[in-house]
Image: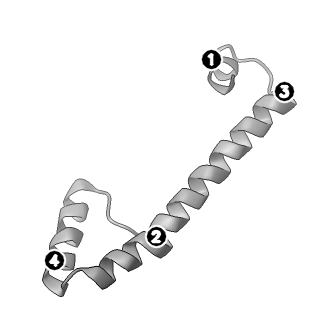
Amino acid sequence: LLDNALRCNQPPRNEVRWHAVALIDSLRRHIDRENNMIFLMTAQMLSEKEYGDLAEALARTGKAPR
């Protein structure tokens, strides 16, 4: 529904707007969980060397946490 409405340049309807807002909210919560839970848990489980290696690998791919 959202994809089709955007491709057709239709004016946003309430339903399309709702789906867009829900998608953005879901992505924001996902990113927040990654930044505030997953990376912290990873840091606790890996040795300093392993975490450093991971940080370097992420930096090389341009996906390092900010």
- Circle 3 packing at 10 Å, graded few (<14), some (14-19), many (20+), is few
Q: Real-space Cα distance between discs 1 and 4? A: 45 Å
Question: Which numbered disc covers residue 13?
Answer: 3
Rendered view: 23 above or below 38:
above
- Three-letter code, disc 4: Glu
Question: Which numbered disc covers residue 26?
Answer: none
- Three-letter code, disc 2: Asn
Residue under numbered circle 2: 35
Q: Tell me what residue is drawn at x 62 percent, y 23 percent.
A: 3
Residue under numbered circle 1: 7
Q: Tell me what residue is drawn at x 57 percent, y 51 percent.
A: 27
Task: Tell which of 51 and 59 is nearer to you.
Answer: 51
- Three-letter code, disc 3: Arg
Q: How many marks?
A: 4
Secondary structure of the residue carrying tag 2 is helix
Q: Real-space Cα distance between discs 4 and 3? A: 49 Å
Residue under numbered circle 4: 50
> Could you tell which of marks 1 and 4 lies nearer the N-terminus?
1
Q: Real-space Cα distance between discs 2 and 4? A: 18 Å
> Could you tell which of marks 1 and 2 lies nearer the N-terminus?
1
